[in-house]
């Protein structure tokens, strides 16, 4: 989608397809504050300092189909790793706009840690308890009536409501603390921030975690563009900036009495899902941002 | 000790965050009565986890994410606050340190990397020189500089670097190079504290006992 928008804008770009690593070479050098280098893809050579924007959607290079059957220490596998390492290291120090650098994406690896950063930017956050004590969980449930449990890390991160049959196996948490949160009633809103721009999408769903509605029998999701109040839009922009994310997917919940909670900030937002359902011009905005036009 | 804690209670919400840990020997650590934390954690205690390899890996990631959060709630000085890139402060690649050192005004060795290079693991932990290269280490502790024969310019550069990277306890390494004896050669959030002697201990004590800030 971004490529299509760059074409419409008539802007030059280079595409590095990870699966063609055999045909690429990269080098960079740092002297003082200056970072220079070259990227060669097949017969095309680019000076790294000429790039003004970089959009990364990399998968784990060690899982690429092209090296799946390579022995652990094969030259081809080592070259693949070295090329990706060079690319990733350059992205962290390049003067170009990089969407997004690896370091700030790390805040999402610990959900409660990120929640503290979100709270520091003036957002209300759901009351959260992380514990290995079943009695504390029962007390938390009694206080809030309805609670959810979810991963503390970004692995296996699916939100589930705590049900009666979950209480029967609550003793298992003694092995490893689990994260519980007060369930916030209200409407989901995803806000994509890109620099100073915001794209807000209202989501109406019949399931707890709309991202996985297709896995739930009868699960439904509907999306509509919406306009945020100016103050809230500005607060979202500041949140993205505070987390050093050029491009962020901020998950809000707006309660029936209009209180706004922020649940999470996604550092690698799958914006195409929202654009495909609403027509919001996020890809175009991203293309313009990468080109330094906005 | 932490690995076998009997009870963990980490709470957070709009009003604040807290941690209460009941250790196996019955002692209790509470964030509201802890003044100053020297954080030297490098890995997550996980020997006690009994699970399949996949579930065990998941549990380790959960524990890591948990530690990054609860270590962040102490109101006083924390040397260093945890980050997703390192429990005792952020580990950075050597290439990032070269750029950051330049921003801090520290003359640095140049850096070069190509896709034909063998991946150098020492660069992963912020070193620009091989392990056996003699280096001089300056340690920054909460804005104070500890080191021998450190010029005011280098001391200020080290303080600036620690501030830029938000790492109050930072070991900054120097070697002989183009800028003379004080050419930046790397940095670490986990410096060898024995290098600082009594002077470092005095500074650590002062910083850790400093008035707690409201979080």
Image: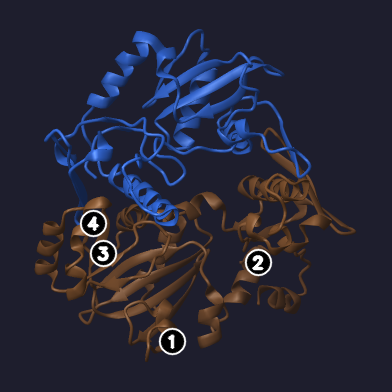
Chain colours: A brown, B blue
The reply to whether label 3 and label 4 mark residues of one chain is yes
Of the pair A138 and A58, the residue shown nearer to us: A138
Real-space Cα separation, disc 1 to disc 2, in angstroms:
28 Å
Question: Residue A14's spot in the image, x, y percent?
Answer: 77, 63
Q: Of tags 1 and 2, which is closer to the observer?
A: 1
Residue B79 locus on image (x, y percent): 34, 31
Q: Are marks 1 and 4 on the same chain?
A: yes
Single out the mark in the foreground, 4 or 2: 4
Question: Disc 2 is attached to a residue of which chain?
Answer: A
Q: Nearer the viewer, residue A48 or A165?
A: A165
| Nearer mark to the viewer, of 1 and 4 | 4
Q: Residue reaching furthest right?
A: A43
Q: Are marks 4 and 2 on the same chain?
A: yes
Q: Which residue is mark 3?
A: A124
- On the image, the x and y values in percent for residue A170 come to 19, 62
Using the numbered discs, state the Cα–Cα distance from disc 3 to disc 1 in whole angstroms. Answer: 24 Å
Q: Which of the marked residues, 3 or 4, is nearer the chain's N terminus?
A: 3
Identify the image quadrant of the N terminus of chain A: bottom right
Point out the frontmost of discs 3 and 4. 4
Q: Does the image show residue B114?
A: yes
Q: Is residue B94 left or right of residue B22?
A: right
Q: Which residue is mark 4?
A: A173
What's the distance in space between the residues labelled 1 and 4, CA to CA?
Answer: 36 Å
Q: Secondary structure at mark 4?
A: helix
Circle 2 sits on which residue?
Answer: A293
Residue B190 in which image quadrant: top left
């Amino acid at each position: 989608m971004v490529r299509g928008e760059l074409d419409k804008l008539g802007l030059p770009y280079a595409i590095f397809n990870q699966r063609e690593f055999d045909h690429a070479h990269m080098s960079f050098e740092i002297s003082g504050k200056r970072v220079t280098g070259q990227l060669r893809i097949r017969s095309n050579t680019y000076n790294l300092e000429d790039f003004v924007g970089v959009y990364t959607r990399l998968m784990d290079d060690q899982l690429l189909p092209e090296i799946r059957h390579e022995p652990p220490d094969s030259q081809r596998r080592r070259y693949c790793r070295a090329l990706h390492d060079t690319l990733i290291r350059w992205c962290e120090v390049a003067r170009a706009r990089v969407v997004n650098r690896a370091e700030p994406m790390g805040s999402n690896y610990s959900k409660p840690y990120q929640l503290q950063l979100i709270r520091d930017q003036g957002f209300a956050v759901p009351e959260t308890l992380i514990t290995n004590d079943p009695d504390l969980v029962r007390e938390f449930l009694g206080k809030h009536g309805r609670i959810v449990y979810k991963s503390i890390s970004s692995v296996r991160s699916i939100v589930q409501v705590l049900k009666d049959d979950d209480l029967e196996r609550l003793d298992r948490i003694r092995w490893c603390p689990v994260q519980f949160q007060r369930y916030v009633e209200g409407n989901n809103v995803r806000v994509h921030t890109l620099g100073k721009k915001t794209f807000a999408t209202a989501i109406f769903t019949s399931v707890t975690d709309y991202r996985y509605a297709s896995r739930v029998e009868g699960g439904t999701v509907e999306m509509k563009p919406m306009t945020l109040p100016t103050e809230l839009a500005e607060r979202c922009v500041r949140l993205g900036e505070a987390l050093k994310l050029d491009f962020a997917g901020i998950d809000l919940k707006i309660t029936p009495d209009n209180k706004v909670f922020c649940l999470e900030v996604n550092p690698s937002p799958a914006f195409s899902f929202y654009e495909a359902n609403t027509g919001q011009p996020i890809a175009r905005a991203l293309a313009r941002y990468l080109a330094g036009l906005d | 000790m932490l690995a076998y804690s009997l009870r963990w209670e980490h709470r957070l919400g709009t009003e604040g965050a807290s941690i209460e840990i009941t250790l196996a020997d019955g002692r209790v650590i509470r964030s509201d009565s802890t003044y100053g934390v020297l954080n030297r954690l490098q890995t997550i205690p996980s020997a006690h986890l009994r699970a399949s390899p996949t579930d065990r890996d998941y549990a380790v990631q959960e524990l890591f994410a948990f530690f990054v959060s609860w270590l962040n709630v102490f109101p006083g000085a924390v040397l260093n606050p945890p980050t997703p890139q390192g429990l005792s402060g952020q580990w950075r690649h050597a290439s990032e340190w070269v750029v950051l050192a330049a921003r801090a005004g520290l003359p640095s060795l140049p850096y070069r990397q190509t896709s034909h290079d063998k991946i150098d693991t020492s660069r992963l932990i912020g070193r620009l020189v091989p392990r056996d290269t003699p280096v001089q280490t300056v340690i920054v502790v909460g804005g104070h500089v500890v080191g021998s024969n450190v010029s005011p310019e280098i001391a200020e550069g080290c303080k600036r670097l620690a501030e830029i990277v938000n790492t109050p306890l930072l070991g900054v390494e120097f070697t002989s190079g183009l800028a003379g004896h004080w050419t930046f050669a790397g940095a670490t959030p986990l410096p060898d504290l024995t290098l600082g002697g009594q002077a470092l201990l005095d500074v650590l004590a002062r910083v850790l006992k400093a008035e707690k800030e409201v979080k």
